[in-house]
Image (spheres, rainbow, N blue to C red):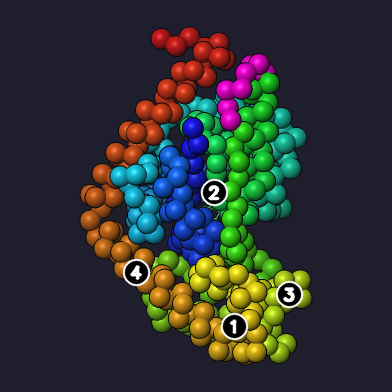
Amino acid sequence: MNRIFSGVQPTGNLHLGNYLGAIRNWVDMQNSFKCIFCVVDLHAITIPQKPEELLQATREVTAAYIACGIDPKTSIIFPQSSVSVHSELAWILGCHTPLGWLNRMTQFKEKSGKHADKSSLGLYGYPVLMAADILGYKATHVPVGEDQKQHLELARDIAGAFNRFYGSEYFPLPEPLIQGAATRIMSLRDGTKKMSKSDESDYSRINLTDNAETIELKFRKAKSDALPGITYDPEHRPEAANLINIYAALAGISRDQVVEKFGNNNFSDFKKALAELAILQLSPITAYMRDLLRDTSYIDSVLKDGAEKADAIAARHMREIKEMVGFLTL
Ligand code: TYM
């Protein structure tokens, strides 16, 4: 059976990259797959978090899932920390993960910077926990943005190592689904840097909580170049390419069609059209999120119900895994 698993970290504001690169693509998948969408709070604490902000962000990500079109009646939505299998399986898989594999992970290098010695074991083991998230449900497909590709390759390697060691085909090798024009949305201030929750400048990203004026202002101030017209040339015109990708993804058309439509325009007109389109699509989501967050009891009930369903699947797998490893299952 095909099963989808994906997740978002409850750290800071969700942005257009999370929406176009991930969450929006999940909505249609609900019709053809069994879907499990996790709010990955265990991953969030690999970087220090304030408890009250983490709690609030967990509810915000849940509200965003629902407001973007994830239906809690069809899909499972739950907080990672509420299902103990994630941490338990991460330990077992960690015992099958050579350090050499982890040392290749670019995200750890980026996040730890020049101070790798001061980084936590949690940050280093982050991709193993991610493998446990996916494999704990024996997920077959994982829809993510481009930046998660290396982690998914590692999850496949870990699944393969486990299967080989125990002489079985227990874990399916999960397939990454990296789809559409917006697999890597870049910062609005620097077309060579990924749009990210952690960027110091709020002008670098469109948040799902931004109002219409802010969205308009951020696109107006977005970095562009002095070349004439709008052309798609990611190497020489990264900012223009990024805006074209965003327009294409929002409008559901190809890059070529965007260039055909705006090729002779100047940036100011193109940005205005882009802002209008973004506002049209994002404002109902923002309004719905705000409504949902007014009553946290509904959000919490969705998470509780999802946690029970997720736990039922993962705990069954965990018993099988424990037997394979040679643990007593009492
Ligand atoms: P996170 O919280 O950083 O991002 C959530 C999702 O958004 C995508 N994304 C982007 N897509 C396009 N352009 C961008 N600028 C951009 N920024 C973020 C990410 O690729 C991701 O799909 N490690 C994951 C969370 C995770 C997970 C998992 C995902 C934990 N366990 C198991 C899949 C399966 C992460 O940090 O996502």
Q: CA distance from mark 3 to mark 2?
A: 27 Å
Q: Assess mark 2: CB under 8 A from ligand 1? A: yes
Which residue: 55% across, 37% down? Answer: 140
Q: Which residue is identified by label 3?
A: 233
Q: Which residue is mark 4?
A: 284
Some atom of ligand 1 lies within 8 Å of the CB belonging to the residue at label 4: no
Mark 1 vs 2, N-terminal side: 2
Residue matched to label 2: 143
Residue at image point 35% right, 36% down: 307
Query: Do tag 4 and tag 1 residues touch (Cβ < 8 Å)?
Result: no
Instruction: From the viewer's side, name the closer residue of 4 and 80.
Output: 4
Q: Quadrant of the C terminus?
A: top left
| Residue 184 position by quadrant | bottom right
Instruction: Give me the C-alpha separation between circle 1 and circle 2.
Output: 30 Å
- Reading the image, the residue beneath label 1 is 261
Whole-percent x and y of residue 115?
68, 50
Whether 291 is drawn above or below 39: the answer is below
Q: Can I make out residue 40 in this image?
A: no
- Mark 3 or mark 2, earlier in chain: 2
Mark 2 crowd level (few <14, some 14–19, many ≥20, 10 Å Cα): many
User: Disc 1 to disc 3, how far (Cα)?
Assistant: 16 Å
Which residue occupies the foreground of this view, 202 or 241? 241
Q: Which residues are magenta?
A: 165-172
Earlier in the chain: of badge 3 and badge 4, it is: 3
What kind of residue is marked 3? Asp
Identity, as a three-letter code, of the amino acid under mark 1: Lys
